[in-house]
Image: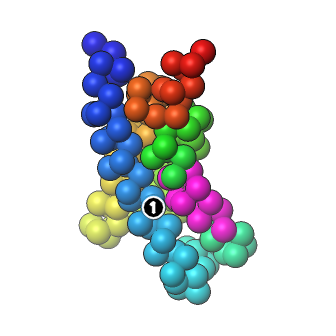
Amino acid sequence: MTIDRYPAVSFIGRLLMCSLFLVSGIGKVAAPAATKAYIASAGLPLPDIAYLAAIAVELGLGTLLLLGYRTKLVAGLMALFTLATAFAFHAHFDDANQQIHFLKNLSIAGGLIQFAVWGAGAWSLDGLRARRI
């Protein structure tokens, strides 16, 4: 069984995965001051730059994942971002809510790693490019 055998499933997986990033990115654009304050409260340096990087990953790479463009690279970068945010914002293991968010991020990174290994599937720009070659 290959990923191309079930192109709709791959597309649905990408749609579900990127929905979290796109919605989160839109929320950050809608509330930049609150987002930068949260970044600063986590003790991260340069909250303005971190804010812009988060927007780029969540909206930019999230859109590329949805479209299935350069999926292996995009998903790998998104997995690294997701792991970094797990440790930067949610590694407070004495708080059960933060533990859940930490584990959620690990799970998301795991799903992204699957896309980094297997690619986007046939219903994607990557798939279209492969068919043209």
The structure residue drawn at horizontal position 58% and vertical position 56%, both measured from the top left corner, is 60
Question: Which residues, given as a range, are shown in magenta?
Answer: 52-62
Q: Which of 18 and 78 is in front in this view?
A: 18
Can you see residue 41?
no
Position above or below: 69 against 106: above
* Res 47 seen here: yes
Name the quadrant containing residue 92.
bottom left
Residue at the (60%, 15%) spot, across then down: 133
Q: Where is residue 10 shown, x and y percent of the image?
A: 34, 33
Q: Mark 1 points at which residue?
A: 22
Q: Is residue 127 above or below residue 29?
A: above
Q: Nearer the viewer, residue 123 or 23?
A: 123
| Residue occupying the point 44% across, 40% down | 112
Amino acid type for the residue under numbered disc 1:
Leu
Instruction: Determine which quarter of the picture holds residue 14.
Output: top left
Q: Name the foreground residue: 63 vs 45.
A: 63
Task: Find residue 35 and report its horizontal and vertical position in percent.
Answer: 54, 79
Q: Does the magenta stretch include residue 61?
A: yes
